[in-house]
């Protein structure tokens, strides 16, 4: 097995680790101290930090520990009154004029994980250059760190971010068209933070919905709170029993989504993103540039091309889109791991927004997701995509490092027309099909991706991606 460092390490979406091993109260205080020190290097007015947490074991206590330490530094803290989705906290940072935001969450990882996401004053995930400095400061502090401090609890105030967030979201969606369509919706909050957010705004707008798993459970019913087909089996049952037209799910901290069509058929998240992009460009006046990570299918490019939209490709991680939204370079962004946002809302991915836009799209078009996918494929052609993963072991890491250094002109008789090493290894072939392998930024896994113009080609490319981790010459 690979031995992983027990110090703080930020990946594509924050710091993630196993509770009691990497994520401990000492490490929480270390990273909190490091964050305040790093903020003070950049600005003189570190006077307020906003803190949130998810439904996991110890998340609330980690958040309280961080709040007390920050208050001891003469900095005011606003601590959420209950668990809240990460995008809600990101919005609160901007609304309250805070220097930064912290969310203690393990996101979609299994129940034994927890972690931390840091948001800047702009309400976006902190960039790598900032988190690298936080990591370096953690290492420096850890040598002789004394985590005793004098509490100043009067500087900590509780607040409810829900009303302002829902008020922000309300005018973005065409509720009249959803309501008049008569569609019925089933919602699975997966025991996570969007309970009484997603279902609340639907019911407040008189949209019929059935909600499941809408209680707090630190163990998420024994599953990872991830919007996978396996995890949504109960949602499929509810859809069939209620004759629902759409099924929605959100992950543990509410920034990712899952979509099910009538008949409880799963819609691939990348296809869902492409459909929503197409809808916004055709009916909602979206004209700006579109962001896509390098591991996201080029179906998005095909949709963008049809509407004359520029596509900006980034490494994996929604944090790469944030600065481009702030600068006005992006209007929409999506990544294959079920992340989506629109500039009219937030510069950060939001699973609640994605679900509501999908509801509006189906209502406005008068068609189910399967029909919309068929219509889109007739216009832009078929794109078949799959992502899987293998464990990161000492052997798989050694092979990965070797493949990264290898020169690629052909693989199994296929000409390689482009090699991209910005984030792992991506091999692009004639016609635009591709495969990619990269190290996960949030858990000890190696991600494998493949996109082809037919299901057979996609399966063949995924087979090649797996073969990269054999000792054979390719």
Image (cartoon, rainbow, N blue to C red):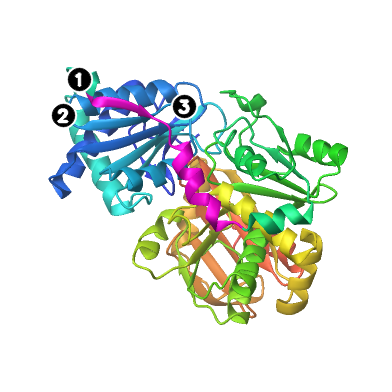
Main SS, magenta residues: helix
Identify the residue shown where x is 18% and y is 38%: 37
Quadrant in which the C terminus appears = bottom right
| Foreground pick, 452 / 337 | 337
Q: Residue at x 47, y 67 (%)?
A: 331
Q: Which of the 4 image quarters holds residue 435?
A: bottom right
Q: Which residues are magenta?
A: 155-173
Query: What is the crowding at mark 1: few (fewer than 14 residues within 10 Å), some, or many (at least 20)?
Result: some
Q: Is residue 364 left or right of residue 38?
A: right
Q: Residues within 10 Å of mark 3 (few under 14, many from 20)?
A: some
Q: Relative to 273, is 187 above or below?
A: above
* Quarter of the rendering containing residue 409: bottom right
Q: Are marks 2 and 1 in contact (CB under 8 Å)?
A: yes
Q: Nearer the viewer, residue 300 or 439?
A: 300
Disc 2 or 1, which lies upstream in sequence?
A: 2
Q: Which residue is mark 1?
A: 152
Picture residue at 73% right of the left edge, 78% below the top: 379
**Mark nearer the N terminus (3 vs 1):** 3
Left or right: where does residue 33 sit relative to residue 380?
Answer: left
Q: Position of residue 308 (x, y in %)?
A: 56, 82
How much space separates mark 3 and mark 1, taking CA atoms?
Answer: 21 Å
Image height of 284 relative to 106, above or below: below
Q: Earlier in the sequence, mark 2 or mark 3?
A: 2
Residue 196: percent from the left, percent from the top?
A: 59, 33
Q: Helix, strand, or loop for circle 1?
A: loop
Identify the residue under disc 2: 74
Q: Are marks 2 and 3 in contact (CB under 8 Å)?
A: no
Whether 398 is among the magenta residues is no
- In this rendered view, identify the residue nearer to me: 371 or 425: 371
**Label 3 element class:** loop
Pinpoint residue 334: horizontal percent, then vertical percent. 54, 60
Q: Which mark is residue 82?
A: 3
């Amino acid at each position: 097995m690979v031995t992983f460092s027990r110090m703080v390490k930020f990946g594509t979406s924050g710091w993630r680790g196993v509770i009691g091993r990497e994520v401990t109260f000492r490490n929480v205080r270390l990273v909190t101290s490091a964050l305040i020190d790093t903020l003070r290097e950049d600005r003189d007015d570190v006077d307020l930090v906003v803190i949130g947490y998810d439904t996991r074991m110890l998340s609330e206590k980690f958040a309280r520990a961080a709040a007390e330490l920050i208050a001891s530094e003469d900095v005011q803290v606003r601590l959420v009154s209950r668990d809240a989705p990460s995008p809600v906290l990101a919005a609160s940072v901007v609304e309250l004029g805070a220097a930064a935001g912290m969310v203690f969450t393990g996101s979609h990882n299994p129940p034994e994980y927890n972690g931390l996401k840091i948001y800047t004053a702009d309400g976006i995930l902190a960039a790598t250059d900032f988190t690298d400095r936080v990591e370096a400061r953690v290492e420096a502090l850890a040598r002789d760190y004394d985590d005793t401090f004098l509490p100043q609890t009067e500087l900590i105030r509780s607040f409810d971010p829900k009303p302002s967030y829902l008020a922000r979201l309300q005018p973005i969606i065409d509720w009249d068209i959803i309501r008049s369509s008569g569609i019925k919706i089933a919602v699975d909050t997966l025991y996570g933070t969007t309970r009484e957010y997603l279902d609340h705004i639907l019911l407040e707008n008189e949209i019929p919905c059935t909600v499941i798993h809408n209680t707090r459970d630190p163990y998420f019913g024994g599953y990872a709170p991830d919007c996978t087909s396996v995890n949504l089996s109960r949602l499929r049952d509810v859809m069939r029993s209620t004759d629902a037209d759409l099924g929605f799910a959100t992950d543990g901290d509410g920034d990712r989504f899952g979509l099910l069509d009538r008949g409880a058929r799963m819609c691939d998240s990348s296809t869902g993103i492409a459909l929503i992009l197409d809808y916004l460009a055709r009916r909602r006046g979206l004209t700006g540039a579109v962001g896509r990570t390098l591991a996201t299918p080029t179906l998005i490019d095909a949709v963008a091309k049809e509407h004359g939209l520029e596509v900006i490709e980034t490494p994996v991680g929604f944090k790469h889109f944030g600065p481009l939204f702030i600068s006005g370079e992006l209007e929409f962004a999506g990544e294959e791991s079920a992340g989506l946002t629109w500039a009219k809302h937030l510069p950060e991915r939001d699973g609640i927004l994605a679900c509501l836009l999908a509801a509006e799209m189906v209502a406005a078009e008068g068609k189910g997701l399967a029909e919309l996918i068929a219509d889109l494929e007739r216009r832009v052609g078929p794109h078949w995509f799959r992502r899987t993963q293998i464990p990161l072991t000492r052997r798989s890491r050694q092979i990965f490092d070797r493949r990264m250094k290898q020169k690629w002109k052909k693989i199994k008789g296929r000409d390689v027309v482009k090699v991209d090493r910005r984030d792992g290894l991506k091999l692009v072939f004639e016609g635009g099909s591709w495969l990619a392998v990269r190290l996960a930024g949030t858990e000890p896994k190696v991600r494998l991706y493949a996109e082809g113009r037919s299901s057979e080609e996609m399966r063949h490319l995924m087979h090649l991606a797996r073969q990269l981790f054999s000792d054979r010459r390719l």
